Image (cartoon, rainbow, N blue to C red):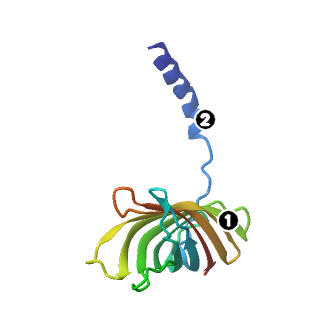
Amino acid sequence: MKKIKMLLITIAMLLPSLASADVPAWEWGPKYMGEMHIGYGTSRKQNGYKAYCGRAMLGTLQGVQLSNYLSAAVGVDAVMFTHYYKGQDMRFNMDVYLDLRGYYPLSDNFAPFLDLGLGTFFNVHPWNDGQTAFFCQFGPGFRYRKFNFSCGLQQHDTGPTGLTTFYTKIGLYF
């Protein structure tokens, strides 16, 4: 009871100073934002064996830059699996996701960011009855002038354990 009373007294003492604090200027200036990127996702081990499921990616982001600190876009990546099974065709899928980025601009030319992409992926070839599954990517990156670099983890929820791999992407921002 004594700790709660001290907490309430502390909050009551801080309230006047919080009311007079300056709020940082958040300048909203929505404008078009786009990106074309290429990337690669690594392979992984499954039950102690290499699964050879590397992925080459070619994609785009189309959306809006809300301010210098935040952007939201729709991402579409065409993905080609880099392994080949004898007697079968190459395998392709698509990732479609909402991409949110929080920036911390250090100068007009350089801004590190955190990237979060949430959406779905589906097989294109061979077509597996139109099954889709959850897709998530998260990681750091930076924009230098008109170039973007990002990396992190991607999760393709393909079953009980899913498929979590490391990815890197380099792109042209416009």
Label 2 is placed on what type of residue?
A: Ser
Q: CA distance from mark 2 to mark 1?
A: 32 Å
Name the outermost residue toward the front. 86
Q: Secondary structure at mark 2?
A: helix
**Disc number at residue 111?**
1
Quadrant containing the C terminus is: bottom right
Q: How many marks?
A: 2
Quadrant containing the N terminus is: top left
Task: Please name the residue shown 44% across and 84% down the image.
Answer: 90
Label 1 is placed on what type of residue?
A: Ala
Q: Earlier in the sequence, mark 2 or mark 1?
A: 2
Expressed as whole percent of the image width and height from the top left, the position of residue 115 reads 54, 63
Expressed as whole percent of the image width and height from the top left, the position of residue 48 reads 48, 56
Task: Please name the residue shown 49% across and 61% down the image.
Answer: 49
Q: Is residue 79 left or right of residue 130?
A: right
Q: Mark 2 highlights which residue?
A: 17
